[in-house]
Image: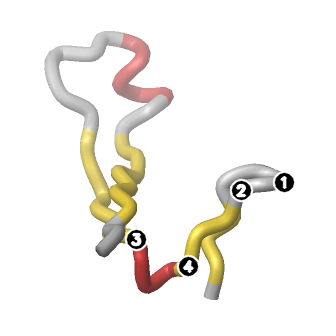
C-alpha cells in the first residue's frame, strides 16, 4: 500500500515508520485545536 504525500509523491508503506505524537507545552488555545499529529520517517536501505 502506498502513502500519498501529495498528488505527485507517494511512498510504499513498508518504507515508512509512523508514530502518533501529542502536542507539547502549555499550548493555550492552540492545544485545543491541534492536540496530536503523525510523525513519519522514511526508512531507506
Label 2: element kind? loop
Q: Do the CB atoms of the residues marked 3 and 4 lie less than 8 Å apart?
A: yes
Reading the image, the residue beneath label 3 is: 16
For image coordinates 36% across by 37% down, the residue present is 35
State the residue lying farthest toward the top: 28
Measuring from the top left, give residue 38's x and y in whole percent.
40, 52
Q: Nearer the viewer, residue 23 or 4?
A: 4
Label 4: element kind? strand
Label 3: element kind? strand
The earlier-in-sequence mark between 4 and 1 is 1
For image coordinates 35% across by 69% down, the residue present is 44
Residue 10 in which image quadrant: bottom right
Measuring from the top left, give residue 31's x and y in whole percent.
35, 24
| Image: 33 above or below 17 | above
State the residue lying farthest toward the front: 45
| Quadrant housing the C terminus | bottom left
Label 1: element kind? loop
Q: Do the CB atoms of the residues marked 3 and 2 lie less than 8 Å apart?
A: no
For image coordinates 30% across by 58% down, the residue present is 20
Tell me how far mark 3 sits from mark 2, CA to CA: 13 Å
Tell me how far mark 4 sits from mark 1, CA to CA: 15 Å
Residue 11 in which image quadrant: bottom right
Q: Nearer the viewer, residue 34 or 19?
A: 19
Callout 1: few (<14), some (14-19), or many (20+) C-alpha neighbours within 10 Å? few
Measuring from the top left, give residue 8's x and y in whole percent.
81, 54
Tell me how far mark 4 sits from mark 2, CA to CA: 10 Å
- The disc at residue 9 is 2
- The disc at residue 7 is 1
- The disc at residue 12 is 4
| Image: 10 above or below 8 | below
Measuring from the top left, give residue 9's x and y in whole percent.
71, 56
Amino acid at each position: 500500500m502506498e502513502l500519498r504525500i501529495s498528488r505527485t509523491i507517494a511512498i510504499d508503506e513498508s518504507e515508512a515508520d509512523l508514530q502518533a505524537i501529542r502536542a507539547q507545552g502549555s499550548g493555550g488555545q492552540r492545544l485545543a485545536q491541534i492536540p496530536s499529529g503523525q510523525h513519519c520517517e522514511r526508512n531507506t536501505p
